[in-house]
Amino acid sequence: MLSAATDLALGRPGARTALYLLESWWAKSRLPAVPSPSLGLVAKVAADEAFRTLMVAMSHLPSRRELVVIRDELERAAELFGERGWQDRPQAYHVEPPGLSSVLSRRERCWGLDYDHIRFVSGYEPHEGEPGRERWLSYKPVRTAHAWVLRHRGHARPWLVCVHGYRMGFPLADFTAFRARWLHEELGLNVVIPVLPLHGERKIGKRSGDGFFTAAFMDTVHAEAQAIWDLRRILDWIRGQEGGERLGVYGISLGGYTAALLAGFDGNLDCIVAGMPAISLTALLRIHAPKRLLRAAEAAGIRWETAETVARVISPLGVRPLVPRERRFLFAGAADRLIPRDHIERLWRHWERPALWWFEGSHLSFTWETDKINSLLARALRQSGLLRLGAGAEPVESRAA
């Protein structure tokens, strides 16, 4: 915490906020409808930067021994992935999971909402011989998949799967971030919020998300691979429910990344909405990791090129989206300082320049930008056909690409 206080005192967030102003004017010439900087946006940028500084200071620094294990696993994984052709064909890395016909369910209540807490045995396993396989299989909490389900009984309503972000995975946080009451009661949707591996009731550390960015990198690969496996099984289960033939996926932050990756495995979705998505987890680590960690990793012989090669199997840029272009939607915060703007641009281009909308906010301000986000999401759901015309509010403060 001392380093965080020092950074804050020395004005690190302020300097990075000034950098945002320069980047924003440059971005306006490259991307559609990027809002101009304003005093309100600058304040939101400062909040993101302060949060980033504190998170960096609180991050775990692996020991030299742990770093050597990470290095060895990455090198062996890169060799194995090359031999099996997964570097050239990342989709082949992901095994098609079995269908899901039944789940365990119990009725629960949170935030004034009654919902079904469903559970099932995930069944995911890393490939035989894959580095980190035995360690991953030792994490008992990730073996059981969980999801929160808000459904309209006796009515064939469309379904929306909402994929949460990093450190989330609990009903209160998830219902708040996704405006679940609005989606369910005002838009009339059935809503499913799966819990990602290493999060919520599937966490292996003290906090939800521990181990995703802070442990051996192969754990990150396996967490994302299992997320795709579990989501595909949940989609299969939904299609067996009333109204399940109309189905979309919406993710935010890490969930936006995961939704973008999922687009390469299911072409029968009515829509994919990726909110504030990254496209490279290794790039995020290089940007946000403490400098002392980057120096220690380099000293241990960890090469970022090797990590990027391995991570290609879980990158949205490594798969061809199967969801038709007109059903792909992107949105991002104009002042987001946690997800670099070039990530949005690269995914937008990889997705053949679909609809891209910006809201005048940052990564953290997403939570209270209710009217703006509801407007953008309703627009995407209507344009895709998942939401009937007339449902939801008319979009405001947004422009299509």
Image: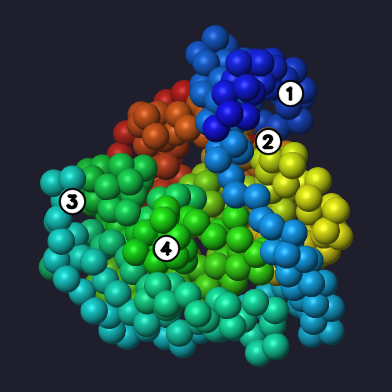
Give the Cα distance between marks 1 and 2. Answer: 9 Å
| Secondary structure of the residue carrying numbered label 1 | helix
Q: Quadrant of the N terminus?
A: top right
Q: CA distance from mark 3 to mark 2?
A: 35 Å
Instruction: Give the mark nearest the N terminus, 1 or 2.
Output: 1
Residue labelled with disc 2: 341
Name which of mark 4 and mark 3 comes first in the sequence. Answer: 3
Q: Amino acid at mark 4?
A: Lys
The reply to whether residue 267 is in sight is no
Q: Earlier in the sequence, mark 4 or mark 2?
A: 4
N-term-proximal mark, 1 vs 3 = 1
Is residue 140 toward the left or the right of residue 153 in the image? Answer: right
Query: 12 above or below 147?
Result: above
Q: Which residue is mark 3?
A: 110
State the residue position of label 4: 203
Q: Secondary structure at mark 4?
A: loop
Q: Are marks 1 and 2 in contact (CB under 8 Å)?
A: yes
Name the residue at 60% across, 55% down. Answer: 214
Which kind of residue does numbered mark 3 sit on? Cys
Question: Comparing marks 3 and 2, which lies closer to the viewer?
Answer: 3
Residue 291 picture quarter: top right
Q: Secondary structure at mark 2?
A: helix
Gap between marks 1 and 3 measured at Cα: 41 Å
Decide which of 305, 324 is in the foreground and name it.
305
Percent across and percent down for residue 379 are 43, 40
Badge 2: residue crowd in 10 Å (few <14, some 14–19, many ≥20): many
Which x, y percent locates residue 255?
A: 50, 54
Kind of residue at badge 2: Arg
Q: Which residue is mark 1?
A: 23
